[in-house]
């Protein structure tokens, strides 16, 4: 009977052992190299698997791809989109889009953890969305959707006993998804308290990291969507053969006008028809944002994690601050003075620490066809971004000198009224 059972179940047991060995042991099995086509597709896919993984991002960023961090604006692919312009005009760089709807600073900090070598002493682009900085900060369900245990184990494998790691651990512990692995959760508790990991925890983290790395090698490129690459290819055909700002600006105006004909907000017809038309009936959205503020939020401290990580790696970053559609904000009551205060606060956080490459577009909210909808850049907006980003990436830049200040993790900073910035600067410097 025992021999019979062994004949039946032996191959299954052996297969299970081999699979476990492949996933856990730190062995290189000669996985297929990421192809140039796979890199092109991944760079614009906005795939959660690519964002959470390592293999494809790492391979592409070792080439001529540059990380473009952000969120839902990347999905607005029109002829002036950064990926389209870079492809059409054969730029020395290609954007690798990192972010999608719901990604904010905390997610982007963890995204950085397994591409540190590709960020060190390199360049990057980062879009700061004012809409992230609401009262409660990042949504827990959105964070959970993009959460990566692989990125967490990589971060824990090289964490240091300082403010950045303690704050990151505390923030992660506030997310329900942190409890998805009991051993990781226990390790985070120790890091948040400023304690060293135990030898058992370090062993577990290494084994977990190896397993997740092997999983990423196997599965990161499976079912990767291709529709965005098709869009980039199609949009590139609409551009003139030779780059000319005046011609592109005129084209952006014509396209914007042709695609915003059915509403008074200069919002794209497709977005208006599918996202707003029914909601606007009866004036239901009139004034609904009059009490909304982007000046007090835990997002300011989460954003400091991003800045701290860039500083550690000496990454030279161009930050983009987009406007809000002025016609839309006038209708919804979103305060223009509040938006200016947000701009002052975020610029102080950047510039006081040496992050001086800023493409601040907040004064362009009334420029025709600058926005594709209520909050996202489009047509002329993307062209304005290109005027800053292209020379930043293609021309030599002075090496940045960062001076990180842990005060930006404090509750005081998160809740500071921008009107008190001058006093705050005088008392904390």
Image (cartoon, helix red, strand yellow):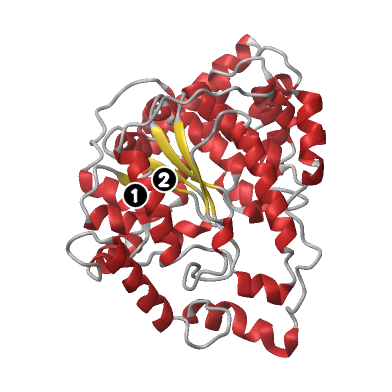
Number of on-image labels: 2
- Residue 177's spot in the image, x, y percent? 66, 42
Quick one: quadrant of the C terminus? Answer: top right
Q: Secondary structure at mark 1?
A: helix
**Image quarter of residue 428:** top right
Is residue 180 in view from this perspective?
Answer: no
As drawn, the label of residue 50 is: 2
Q: At x 62% / y 17%, what residue is drawn?
A: 201
Contact flag, marks 1 and 2 (Cβ < 8 Å): yes
Up-down relation of residue 350 to residue 297 (above or below): above
Give the farthest residue toward the top: 199
As drawn, the label of residue 56 is: none
Quick one: quadrant of the N terminus? Answer: top left
Q: Secondary structure at mark 2?
A: helix
Q: Nearer the viewer, residue 297 or 146?
A: 297
Is residue 206 in view from this perspective?
Answer: yes
- Residue 97's spot in the image, x, y percent? 41, 49
Q: At x 47% / y 86%, what residue is drawn?
A: 261
- Residue 392's spot in the image, x, y percent? 37, 40
Left or right of 139 in this view: 208: left
Up-down relation of residue 384 to residue 270 (above or below): above
- Residue 255's spot in the image, x, y percent? 37, 77
The residue pinned by badge 1 equals 42
Up-down relation of residue 187 to residue 358 (above or below): above
Q: CA distance from mark 1 to mark 2?
A: 7 Å
């Amino acid at each position: 009977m025992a021999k019979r059972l062994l004949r039946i179940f032996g191959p299954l047991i052996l297969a299970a052992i081999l699979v476990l060995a492949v996933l856990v042991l730190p062995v290189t099995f000669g996985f297929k190299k990421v192809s140039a086509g796979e890199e092109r597709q991944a760079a614009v896919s906005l795939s959660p698997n690519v964002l959470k993984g390592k293999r494809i991002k790492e391979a592409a960023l070792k080439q001529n791809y540059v990380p473009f961090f952000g969120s839902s604006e990347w999905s607005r692919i029109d002829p002036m989109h950064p990926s389209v312009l870079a492809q059409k005009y054969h730029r020395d760089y290609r954007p690798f889009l990192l972010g999608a709807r719901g990604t904010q600073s905390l997610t982007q900090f963890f995204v950085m953890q397994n591409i540190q070598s590709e960020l060190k002493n390199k360049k990057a682009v980062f879009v700061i969305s004012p809409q992230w900085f609401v009262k409660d900060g990042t949504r827990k369900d959105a964070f959970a959707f993009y959460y990566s245990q692989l990125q967490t184990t990589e971060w824990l494998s090289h964490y240091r006993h300082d403010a950045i790691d303690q704050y990151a651990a505390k923030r992660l512990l506030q997310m329900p998804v942190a409890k998805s692995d009991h051993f990781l959760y226990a390790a985070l508790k120790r890091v948040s308290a400023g304690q060293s990991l135990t030898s058992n925890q370090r062993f577990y983290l290494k084994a977990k990291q190896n397993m997740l790395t092997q999983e990423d090698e196997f599965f990161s490129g499976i079912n990767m969507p291709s529709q965005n690459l098709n869009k980039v290819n199609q949009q590139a055909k609409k551009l003139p053969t030779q780059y000319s700002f005046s011609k592109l600006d005129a084209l952006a105006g014509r396209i914007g006008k042709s695609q915003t004909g059915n509403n008074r907000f200069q919002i794209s017809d497709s977005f208006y028809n599918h996202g707003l038309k029914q909601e606007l009936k009866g004036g239901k959205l009139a004034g609904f944002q009059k009490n909304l503020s982007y000046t007090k939020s835990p997002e300011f401290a989460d954003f400091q994690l991003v800045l701290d990580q860039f500083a550690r790696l000496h990454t030279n970053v161009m930050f983009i601050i987009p406007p809000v559609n002025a016609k839309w904000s006038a209708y919804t009551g979103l305060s223009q003075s509040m938006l200016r205060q947000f701009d002052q606060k975020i610029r102080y956080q950047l510039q006081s620490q040496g992050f001086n490459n800023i493409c601040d577009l907040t004064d362009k909210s009334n420029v025709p066809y600058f926005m594709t909808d209520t909050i996202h850049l489009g047509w002329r907006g993307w062209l304005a971004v290109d005027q800053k980003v292209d020379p930043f990436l293609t021309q030599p830049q002075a090496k940045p000198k960062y001076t990180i200040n842990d005060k930006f993790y404090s509750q005081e900073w998160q809740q500071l009224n921008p009107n008190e910035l001058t006093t705050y600067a005088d008392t904390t410097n």
